[in-house]
Amino acid sequence: MRVLVLIPSRYASTRFPGKPLADIGGQSMIQRVVGQARLAEVARVVVATDDTRIADHVRGFGGAVVLTRPDHPSGTDRLAEAYATLTAAGDAPYDVVVNVQGDEPFIQPSQIEAVVECFRRNPAAQIATLVRRIDSPESLFSPHVVKCVRALDGRALYFSRQPIPYQRDRPTAEWLTHHPYWQHLGVYAYRPAALAHVTTLPPSALEQAESLEQLRWLENGLPIQVAVTEHASIGIDTPEDVARAVAHLLT
């Protein structure tokens, strides 16, 4: 199976401008993301960016990069343009495209391989993503932690910022003891045709209510396969998170 990892990376950020170039223990954040992705069993790793500073930096450490338009409404749209650019330039077609967020410097190769495995197990799969079991009440009830409910066959039934399912006959302090809850992690994988298709769909009511793009796909009848990981997500959203990331390197 021929797999491409695409890493969307923007310089502009309301809370942390220049975030991809932030130094984390002697390497930029984007360099660490690329390095981790290269450890997975994939054919190629490419950064998709709209900023020449990021592009020059990636080329400087030997990474591959595609420049995209600056006006994409989401990282998914940026990925679709990058994929089209690569194939138009002569890249052989890929079986699966994996979207690794550019602010995840500790992404594990096994996490990338887990979402790719969804397509090996189910050749009809079009989209796959990743979850991790929630182990604290703080995460369960935080609206910043997206929850996923899965079907018995591994498909996603729904994503929400609320803790779902609601356990009607138990106090909330006992919910984690009596039912598994799953945190959605922002690693996606697509068949190329599915990646192109989702960018043509208009925003949906559920997506706008929860501010979760993946609900648009479910609402339009596109199944999402779900893989499980034991690794936590350590994303970088603010300058303060950089100190936390450096501390993680030392553990």
Image (spheres, grey):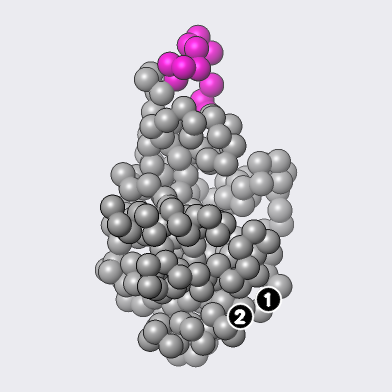
Which residue type carries mark 2? Asp
Pointer 1: what residue? 70
Residue 233 spot, x, y in % from top left:
42, 50
Contact (Cβ within 8 Å) of mark 2 with mark 1: yes
Residue 57 vs residue 68, the one in the foreground: 57
Q: Secondary structure at mark 1?
A: loop
Sort mark 1 into few (<14), some (14-19) or many (20+) by Cα contacts within 10 Å. few
In this rendering, position of residue 201 left or right of residue 24 = right
**Furthest residue in direction bottom, as rendered:** 89
At label 1, which amino acid type do we have?
Answer: Pro
Query: Where in the figure is residue 24, as x and y percent of width and height?
Result: 42, 66
Residue 103 in the image: above or below residue 147: below
Q: Quadrant of residue 39?
A: bottom left
According to the picture, the residue beneath numbered tag 2 turns out to be: 51
- Closest to the observer, 178 or 14: 14
Q: CA distance from mark 2 to mark 1?
A: 8 Å
101 left or right, relative to 32: right
Pick whichever, 68 or 157, lies toward us.
Answer: 68
Determine whether the residue tagged by mark 2 lies in a helix, strand or loop.
loop
Q: N-terminal of the two: label 2 or label 1?
A: 2
What residue lies at 53% left-to-right and 21% top-to-bottom?
A: 166
Which residue is found at the position 43% from the left and 53% from the top? Answer: 244
Camera-side mark, 2 or 1: 2
Q: Which residues are magenta?
A: 164-175
Check if residue 166 falls in the magenta segment.
Answer: yes
